Image: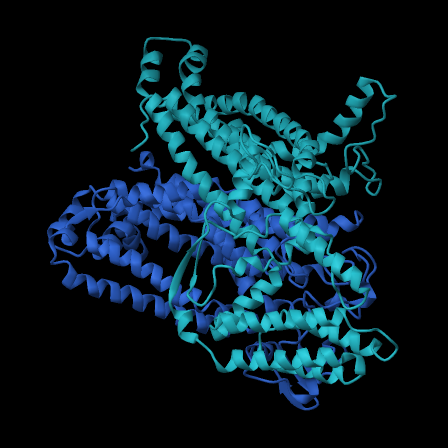
Chain colours: A cyan, B blue
Amino acid sequence: MFKYVLKRFVYFIPTLAIIALVTFALSKMAPGDPVKLALGNKDNGGEAGQTSEKIAGEKAYHEMAEKMGLHLPAFYFDLTTVATPDTLYKYTKKPERENLSRLIAKYGNWDKIEAYYANIKAVQFEMYKVQQDSTTFEGSRTLNSEINRLFTLSKDDEIEASLKTLQTATTLSPNFNSVAAKIASLQQSYSTVKTETANTKNFIPAIHFYGLNNQFHRWLFGDKPYFFGEEQPGQTAGFLRGDFGFSYLDKRPVWSKMKDALPWTLLLNLISIVLAYVVAIPLGVWSARKKGSFADNIVTFLLFLLNSLPVFWIATLMITFLTTDEYGMNFFPTFGLGEVDPSMSNMEVFTERAVHLILPIICLTYGSWAYLSRQMRGGVLSVLRQDYIRTAKAKGLAEGKIIWKHAFRNSLIPIITIFASIFPSAIAGAFIIENIFAIPGMGKLSFEGLVARDYPMVFTVMLLSAVLTLIGNLVADILYAVVDPRISFNK
Amino acid sequence: MSAQNIKQISETLDQSYSAIVKRQFRKNKMAVWSLRFIFVIVFIGLFADFLSNDKPIACSYKGNTYFPIAKSYGVSLGIAKWPKDIANVDWHSLNYDWALLPLIPYSPQYQDLKNDNFKGPFDEQDVPSFRFKHFLGTDKLGRDVMSGMIQGTRVAMMVGVISMSIAVVIGILLGSLAGYYGDTKLKMSRIRIYMNLLFFALGVFYAFMVRSYVLSDALSTSVGSFFIQLLISLFVFFVFMIIANVLVMPLKKIPFLGTQVSIPMDILISRLIEVMVSVPTLLLLLSISAIMSKPSIFVTMIVIGFLGWTGIAKYVRAELLKVRSLEFIEAAQALGLSEARVIFKHAIPNSLTSVLITIAFGVAGAILTESSLSFLGIGVAPEEVTWGSLLSASRSDVSAWWLAIFPGFAIFITVTIFNLIGEGLADAMDPRLKQ
C-alpha cells in the first residue's frame, strides 16, 4: 500500500512538470509585447513627444522588463541554428527580437545583422540630438516613426522603401545633416547584410545552454533565497512558493486578487457538490431497488435528459424568465451577490446572499446530481447481481438489510472516487456560471483576464486548476486503493 | 416463405458479435430514432446554404438564367466570377423574371433593416409576404434567427466530424499501440531506437524549425498555401525517418547495437493519457484562444480533437489487452502475418464496436464544449454564427425569448440524441444481454 502511494507520488512530479512547461510555452506564445501590456500599453519612445520623455519611456520599459525577468534567456537551453547567437535574448523587446530572428533566418549572417541594427539605433540616437526648429517639425515626425518601423521590418522591399523615405526626409532641413550621414552608413550596412549572406549556417542545428538563471526557472522556482540570505529587490519567490506575478490590469499581485475571488468559487462548488451527493445517493439506491418499474423508468429518463441539458442554456432561460418583470415572474435578482452594508444583521446578510446564490447553485448542481444518481444506480445494480447478495437473499435477510448493510457500502466505491473527477468539472462549470450570473469568483476573474489579455492571471488560473485536477486524480487513485485492496498500480 | 422472411432468418442466424450488437441496438427505439435524427442534422448541415440564403437557388434575371448559390461556391473557391449583372447586389431587391428561393430566403449574415431590434415570431413583421416572414424572429441587427439556426447546425456537425476524426485517429493509434504491445512485446534493436530518436529530432529541425517562417507566412496568406507548405514539411520529415531506418540495416550487424530491447509502450502512452486528462480542457481552450490573434471556430474544433482522444485511447487499449490474448490473434500470429496486418486487420476491427460508444459521447461533449465557448464569445470570429453565439445574443435583451429558447433547445436536442445513441450502443454491447 505504502509502496503504491509512493509510486503514485513519483509519477505526479513529471506530470506536473509537463503541465508547467505547456503553460509556460503558451504564455510565451501569447501575442503582444508583455512589457508594453504590463505598462498599460503606453507607447514609449513614440513619434511625438520630448526627447527626455522618450528616454524616460525607454528606461521604464527596461526596468519593467527586468522586473518581469524578461532580460533572462527563456529556458534552460535553446535549440536553434548555428546562425542564431546565444545572446539574442538580450534584445528584451519582443517585436525587435522576433524581427531579428526573422532576419537571421533569411540571411544567416549575424555579425552583419547586428551591425545593421546598431546602425538603426545610432540613427535613432542621432535624432535625439537634432536641434528642433520650425524646419524640422515635419521631418522629425517622419524620421522618428520610420525608424521605429524599421526595427520591426524584415521584408526586403519594405526595408528599402523605408530607407528611401528616411533619406528623403533628411533633405527637409539642414539640421538633419548629421542624421543623413548615419542613414548613409545604415544603408551601407543593410546592403552588406544582403550581399554577404551565410545561409548555410541556417541549416546546422545548435544547442545553447543557459543554466538555471532563466525565465522558466525564475517563474516556477523563483530567484529569492530559500531559507537564509539577503533578499535583493526585484527578486521573486516563484510559482511553487506562491508568487504568481502581478496582474497587468491593476498591477495588484495575482495572489491577492485570487484571495478575494476564491472563497466565492469554493462556496458555490462546496454547496453544489454536497447537495448533489445528498440527493443523488438515496435517489440512485431507490431507483435501483425499483428497477424496471414505471417510476424508475421515468426517473431514469428524466435524469438522462438532465444530464445532457447545457448549463449555460438553463442559466440563460432562468435569467430571461425568472429574474425580470418581462414575463411576470420576477422571483430572483439577476446579477451579482447583492449589496451588503455593515449595518445589516447577520440574518439579513445571509438572506441577501442566499437569494442571489440560489439560481447559480441550481445551475451548478443539477448536472453533477444527475450524473451521480445514474452512477449510483448503476453501482447498486451491479452489486445486486453479485453472488453474495443472492446468498443473503437465500438465507432470508430482509430486503432493506441487504440493500443498506451489504450492497450499499460496496456500491459507494465508484461514487467516492467520482468526487475527484467532479472537482475539475466544477471548476469549468463555475467558469460559465460565474460569468453568466456575474459572481466575482475565479471563473469571472480568469474570463476578465482573458478579455483584457491579462496573461499572468489567465495562466495562473490554468496552471492552478491543472494542479488541482492532478491532486484530485491522485486522491482518487489512492482512495481507490484504500477501499479496494485488489488494485495494484501496474496492471 | 417470402424473401423478407428468409432475410430475417439469415440475419438472426448471423452470430457474429457486430450482428448481435446491431440486433440489440435495433430493439432500442429511442436510439434508433436518434440515429435517424442524425441524418436530418447531417442533411441540414450539408445543404445549409441551399436551405437558407438570401440568394435564389435558381433565377432568371434580364433574360439570363443563373444558379447563384452554386455559383457562390465557385466564387469562394476562386474558380468563377460573378457575372456583371449580379455582382454586389442586394438579392432581395432584384427584379427577377422568375426565381426559386430557398426555404428560408435569408442568409445568417443578412441584416433585414426593416425588422431589426428583436422582432419576435409573433410580433408584427414588416415583410413583403408570408414567404419572407422571420419564423423564429430576428436579432438586434435584423438577422434571421431561423437562418442562424440552420448555419449553426452546420457548425455543430463540423464540430462533431472534425474534432472527433482527429480524436479517433490519435486515440486508435496510441490506444492500439499501448494495448497490443503492452510493456514487453514491442522489441527493437538498440540502434533502431537511437537512430529513430536522432533522426526524429533532425527531421523536426529541418522540416519545421528551419521552415518555421515559411510556414507562418504561408498561414497568414492563405489556408491553401499553408497546406502545400505543410505537405512539403511533412515530406522532408518522412524522408528523414526513412533514411534513419535504412541506415539501421547495416548497423544492426554490430553486436551491441543489434541487441533487441523492449519498449514499454503501455507505460509511455498511459502516462501521456494521464497528463492529457489532468489538463482542464475548457481552461486550456481559453488559454489557446487567448493567444490566437485571429479567432476561428476551426481552431476550437481542432483543439477539442487534440484534447479529446484520451477516452478513445483508453477504450481501445483495454479492448486490445483483451483481444490480443484471444485465439484468433494467436492463430494470425502463428500463420506468420505481419504485426501491422494483425493489428489493423484483426485486432482493431474487433474493438471498434466499443469505440463507437466513446465517439457518440465524444461528439456530444465536443458540441457542448464548442457551444459553451461561443456562448461566452471565445474562439469564435464575430461573423461566425453558431448556436452558442445566437444564444448569447439573448443576454442583451431579456424580452427576446425566442433567442433564449430555440438555439439552446437545438444544442440540447443534439447533445441528447448523441448521448442516447451512446447509451443505446453501450446497452447493446453489454455481454450480459447476449442470448
Number of marks present in the image shown: 0
Using the rendered view, name the quadrant where residue B98 is placed.
bottom right
* Quadrant of image for the N terminus of chain A: top left
Give the x, y percent position of residue A257.
Answer: 69, 36
Look at the image and tell me whether residue A292 can be seen.
no
Q: Is residue A259 above or below residue B361?
A: above
* Quadrant of image for the C terminus of chain A: top left
Which residue does the image show at 16% across and 60% down from the upper left? B251
Using the rendered view, name the quadrant where residue A380 is placed.
top left
Q: Is residue A322 above or below residue A399?
A: below
Give the x, y percent position of residue A4.
Answer: 34, 26
Q: Is residue B162 above or below residue A21?
A: below
Which residue does the image show at 49% across and 21% down from the upper left? A285
Q: Is residue A218 above or below residue B346?
A: above
Of residue A430 and residue B354, the one placed in the foreground of this image is A430
Q: Is residue A267 left or right of residue B422?
A: right
Which residue does the image show at 72% across and 36% down from the upper left? A439
Using the rendered view, name the quadrant where residue A61 is placed.
bottom right
Give the x, y percent position of residue B267.
Answer: 31, 41
Of residue A317 and residue B105, the one placed in the foreground of this image is A317
Of residue B213 and residue A468, the one placed in the foreground of this image is B213
Give the x, y percent position of residue B331.
Answer: 13, 48
Of residue B54 and residue B365, the one placed in the foreground of this image is B365
